[in-house]
Amino acid sequence: MKKYRLLYAAGVLLLGCSETVRVPALHDFGVGPLPPAAAGPQNAATAEIRVIAPKWLSDNRIRYRLLYDQPTRVRFYNLDQWIAPPPDLLRLHFSSGRLGPNYSLVIRLVNFEQQFEAPGSAFVLMHFSVEAFAADSKKKLGAREFVLRSGKISPDAQGAVQGFAELAERARQQVLDWLPESAGSP
């Protein structure tokens, strides 16, 4: 009888250890804007874009904060991650939008997280500033700060990913709309 108990215990231990480890799902902002079909080689040049961020935003974790419970504590999703750090994803997204060769942009990312106002009530927040320079002379054309907040999103990693994809496009569009104001005629 003792022999069977030992075998049973060993079997339970083996089954417990054989559980498969789940690999995190990797996310980006989606395909993004496609360049116009008429864009030929003469329109292929784009702005130089640099995205600078604090060290804590330079990894691929998707961050969230519970504003209603320990609002100073930053948390991370375990089974969902960005495919690259947010500054790299944002630079790639802005580069895909054909800003034109007349500009050089420096984007300073300040905040990039999902926030929960209450259980089941979440939004994403993106805070950044942009400096625009003339590409040929490096003359500063203007600077502006942007704080973008999504509407309510699903209170989970999928909501965060979808919210950030939408905010990244909104950020790109707002910077595009602002550039002619700051540049006059580059």
Image (cartoon, rainbow, N blue to C red):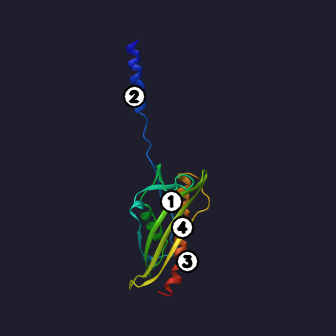
Q: Amino acid at mark 1?
A: Glu
The residues bearing labels 3 and 4 have C-alpha atoms spaced at a distance of: 12 Å
Q: Residue at x 41, y 33 (%)?
A: 18
Q: Which residue is mark 3?
A: 177
Residue at (54, 72) in percent of width and height:
173
- Picture mark count: 4
Which secondary structure, mark 3?
helix
Residue of label 2: 14
Residue 4, position as x, y percentages in the image: 40, 15
Between residue 81 and residue 142, name the one nearer to us: 142
Q: Which mark is residue 113?
A: 1
Secondary structure of residue under mark 4? helix
Which label was assigned to residue 169? 4
First in residue order: circle 2 vs circle 4: 2
Whether pointer 2 and pointer 4 mark residues with C-beta atoms closer than 8 Å, the reply is: no
Pick whichever of labels 3 and 1 is earlier in the sequence: 1
* Amino acid marked by disc 4: Glu
Amino acid on which the number 2 mark rests in the picture? Leu
What amino acid does circle 3 point to? Asp
Q: Nearer the viewer, mark 1 or mark 4?
A: 1
Q: Is residue 37 visible?
A: no
Query: In the shown orientation, is residue 87 left or right of residue 149?
Result: left
